[in-house]
Image (cartoon, rainbow, N blue to C red):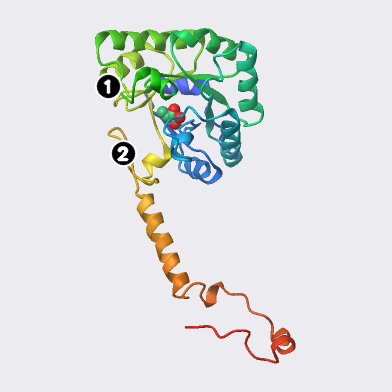
Amino acid sequence: MAAPKPLNIHEMKEMKAKGLPISMITAYDYPSARLAEEAGVDLILVGDSLGNVIINYDSTLPVTMDDIVYHTRAVTRATEHTFIVADMPFMTYHGSIDETLKNVRRIMQEGFAHSVKLEGGAEIGDTVRRIVEAGVPVMGHIGLTPQSIHQIGGYKIQGKDSQGAKRLLDDAKALEQAGAFAVLVEMVTEEAADAIARELSVPVIGIGAGRTCDGQVLVYHDLLGYSSPKKEKRFVKEYADLGTQIRSSIAQYVKEVRERSFPGEEHVFHAKDDVLEQLYGGGKAKTVVG
Ligand code: KIV
């Protein structure tokens, strides 16, 4: 039987129409992407959150095109039937359209992504349109947009007042009109996200955006408790505590090395008797403790 193909953007829209929720997770390397695909996730996002979770920058601003291309390639080498979205890093789509398309080209041709994600609303409508016209699916990203964190003034819930909620809705509509195949909505009230999801015909994927979005996305390391130090986020559900498991496994390894109980007999390669005879006159090279 042929391997299942990744969902395409039209099937995602059909899923929304049928009320079938879409699952998305970030991944940044081969094993994480492979495990996510094996677990059956619909979409993987190579997010610029890699700047936070992989290298512990205090924002996503320092993440570069080279970073995204490198990590996207690692993810796409691991996946066959998952739709891959890659983030356009900070300021890589605000210059000339030629420069923007050059950056999109790198993500598609060198990273092998299926689509790109851009932060912003109506103000990036023309850019979204030009990328879509070039044949590249675009996911929009509104609400809390981490690349504008200094403009926003911190990680705050968006769309809390009627003006803010209206602006979010207008931005979402502008992105849909520009041709975005989906819109990611981050850290907004459930009510604002719900209004957007009702209004749009393309899927709305939420993170910290309540229960009624057409899909959900979480950051791999948040979902798995795979970080140190742990950063509590109200909208995250932790499905595992890998940080604790990893720390205690490594501590056990360190202990066993120190007490010489690792490696054990089952991890050792032995020389043949004739080699032993030639080298050591039949004796053992070194006395093994234990
Ligand atoms: O970069 C990222 O991981 C994101 C998350 C909000 C999903 O955009």
Q: Is mark 1 within 8 Å of ligand 1?
A: no
Residue 102, above or below 44 = above
Question: Which quarter of the frame holds ligand 1?
Answer: top left
Q: Is residue 262 above or below residue 86?
A: below
Mark pair 1, 2: CA separation? 16 Å
Disc 1 is placed on an element classified as helix
User: Quadrant where the N terminus lies?
Assistant: top right
In the figure, is residue 204 to the left or right of 286? left
The residue that label 1 is drawn on is 190
* Amino acid marked by disc 2: Lys
Q: Which residue in the structure is indicated by mark 2?
A: 237
Q: Is mark 2 within 8 Å of ligand 1?
A: no
236 left or right of 263? left
Looking at the rendered structure, the kind of residue marked 1 is Glu
Dot placed on the residue nearer the N-terminal end, 1 or 2: 1
How many residues crowd mark 2 within 10 Å: few (<14), some (14–19), many (20+)?
few
Residue at the image point whose x is 48% and y is 75% from the top: 260
Disc number at residue 7? none
